[in-house]
Amino acid sequence: MYRVLLSSIRVSRSTNLRSIYHLTQVKDVAAGVHSEGDKIQVKGWVKSVRKMKDNVFLDVNDGTCGHNLQLVVSKPQLQDTAYGSSVNVTGTLGRTPKNQLELKVDSLQEHGACPLAEGYPFYPKKSYPPDYIRNHLHLRPQVSSVGSTLRVRHQATKCFNDYLDREGFIQIHTPIITSNDCEGAGEAFLVRPANDGLLKQMAKKGVPHDQAYFD
C-alpha cells in the first residue's frame, strides 16, 4: 500500500511541476535532436527583429551555438521586445518554406530589455574591433565572434582534459601568486623562503637575493 501511495504522489508531483514544454537548447534544435511538432521552451537573447504584416520574426540565441532559432510571434503577443532583450519562450516547432525548423510561439515572457538608448556598447548588425570589445569585458560574450571563440576554447580544453584523464593523469592546481604579469605587475610580489638561513645557503655570486629562490 505504501508503494502504491508513493507512486501516486510521484505521478502527481511530476504532473504538477513539469510542464508539457521541455527546456531546450538552441544547439539541440540545430543538431536535429527535436522535430516538427515538438513543444519546447527556449531561453535566450533576441538578436534581430523583423516585423511583417501579421507576424513578427525574432532570431534568438542562447549562447550554446552560433545558430539562431527563428521565432514566429503574432503581433498581439509581442510586447516591446527588441534587440538584446532576454526572453523565455514556449511554443511548437514547425517548418519554414526552406524546410528549416522554427518555433511558433505560444507565449513570450520578457525578462529584461537591452538599454540601447542608455549606452549599451554593441548595436545590432555592426562589427567592432577587438580593442573596442576588450573595453567591455563583462558584455563581450554577447558578441558573436567572441562567443564562438569561447566555445572553441571550451571544446579544445575539454579534449585535452579528457585525453589526459584517459591516460591516467591527475589535474592539480598549483599555487599561483599572480597570473597577470603585464606592465610589471609580477614585480609587485617577492617569493622567498621564510628562513633567512636557507636563503643564505641558496645565495650565489652574481645572483640577486630575490632571484636566488628560482635559480
Image (spheres, helix red, strand yellow):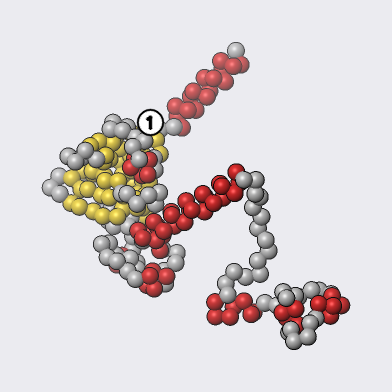
* Quarter of image, res 173: bottom right
Q: Is residue 122 left or right of residue 1?
A: left
- The amino acid beneath tag 1 is Ile
| Position of residue 54 measured from the top left corner of the image (x, y, whole percent) | 15, 44
| Position of residue 94 measured from the top left corner of the image (x, y, whole percent) | 25, 36
| Position of residue 4 measured from the top left corner of the image (x, y, whole percent) | 56, 15
In the rendered image of this protein, does residue 71 appear above or below residue 35?
below
Quadrant where the N terminus sits is: top right
Q: Is residue 193 left or right of residue 121?
A: right
Q: Residue reaching furthest right?
A: 197
Q: Is residue 7 left or right of residue 64?
A: right
Residue lying at 28% horizontally and 31% vertically, measured from the top left: 37
**Residue 76 visible in the snapshot:** no
Q: Residues within 10 Å of mark 1 (few under 14, many from 20)?
A: few
In the rendered image of this protein, does residue 195 appear above or below residue 48?
below
Q: Is residue 4 left or right of residue 149?
A: right
Q: Residue reaching furthest top?
A: 1
Q: Which residue is mark 1?
A: 20
**Residue 206 visible in the snapshot:** yes
